[in-house]
Image (cartoon, rainbow, N blue to C red):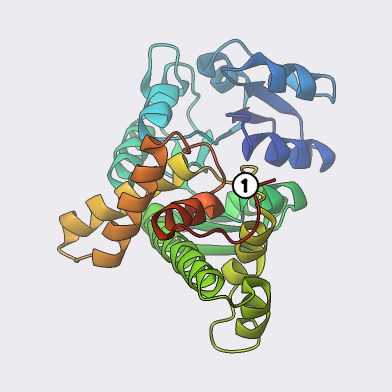
Amino acid sequence: MSNPIIGFIGLGIMGNPMARNLLKAGYSLVIHNRSRASVEELSEEGAQAAVSAKEVAERSEIIITMLPDSPDVELAYAGEQGIFSGVKSGTLLIDMSSISPIVARKLAAEADKRGCDMLDAPVSGGEAGATAATLSIMIGGKTAAVERAMPIVQRLGKNIVHVGDAGAGQITKAANQMVVGTTIAIVGEALVLAAKAGVDPAKVRQALLGGFAQSKILEAHGQKMLERNFKPGFRIRLHEKDMKIALAAGFEYGVPLMVTGQVAQMMSAMKSMGHGDLDHSGLVKLVEELAHAELAPNK
């Protein structure tokens, strides 16, 4: 049985390597993106370009979207030239963006009216995980649809968990972003405290990696902070968006997210200072500025 034709919409920092991994796995791709550079690049590698999301839907059996925010996803699906205007009954829709769970549930209901199953399947792992196909993928939707999607998402990630019905994936991603964002903030505070107190922050990080404070954030993002390497793997402005999604969910379900709120404000401050396109490890710069101390000379 031949592989299904996959439509892929959204070829940014994450979407581009994800689409490339599907091409390498032998899938035929129909692609669309607002910026033409990624479309042209992947077209040279065998993907077929489409002029709209509607055309992608008309030519595909399974559609993956990887877009920045809820409005972008809503436009891609429900806009005048969107997926819903060209989709065929029986098409499987997989949104791998990080968006509001409310929007995810609304779009899944609209898909159901058109005879289509829709999964919300946000990811964690950043650009490195997308490139290496080692993403963590958290999926909300019907079990049968998840089983149908599994051969495809297994080409994109390693830790794949079906967490519940429509919207459950987005709730899980919000929880993920809360833990990642707050941990980045506290790692930054800890290393800046060490530096200002006259202790080598690199040695502090090394010591902490051997105890209960050990984490992937301390390991990877702590090193980026020390190296002043803030090239975006995941931008502060996008993480701020995710923290706002988490806070909105907290309000809706009556859960006080106090620490999340504080770190979201730190991210908002960074965006206002013109640093929204830095990697989220760049959050340390705010701590440095407030403390009048730097981990290492600027490079």
Task: Give the left or right position of residue 296, taking residue 285 as reference.
Answer: right
Q: Nearer the viewer, residue 275 or 59?
A: 275
Residue extending furthest toward the bottom = 211
Name which residue type carries label 1. Phe
In which quadrant is the N terminus drawn? top right
In the rendered image, the vertical position of residue 134 relative to residue 203, given as above or below = above
Classify the position of the C terminus by image quarter: top right
Q: In this rendering, would 277 be left or right of 241?
A: right
Where is residue 184? Give x, y as percent: 49, 63
Residue 95 picture location, percent across and down: 49, 40
Q: Nearer the viewer, residue 232 or 200?
A: 200
Q: Which residue is drawn at 63% across and 54% down?
A: 150
Question: Dot 1: within a 10 Å radius of its alpha carbon, few (fewer than 14), some, or many (20 or more) residues?
Answer: some
SS category of the residue bearing label 1 = loop
Residue at x-position 26% and y-position 54% = 247
**Does the rendering let one see residue 281?**
yes
Q: In this view, does 212 lie to the left or right of 152?
A: left
All told, the count of numbered labels is 1
Q: Is residue 165 above or below residue 268?
A: below
Residue drawn at x 57%, y 75% is 198
Measuring 64% from the left and 51% from the top, which residue is drawn there?
153
Tell me residue 292's x, y (percent). 45, 57
Q: Nearer the viewer, residue 63 or 173?
A: 173
Residue on which disc 1 sits? 230
Spot occupied by residue 281 in the image (x, y as percentages of width and height):
55, 54
* Residue 145 visible in image: no
* Rendering quarter of residue 215: bottom right
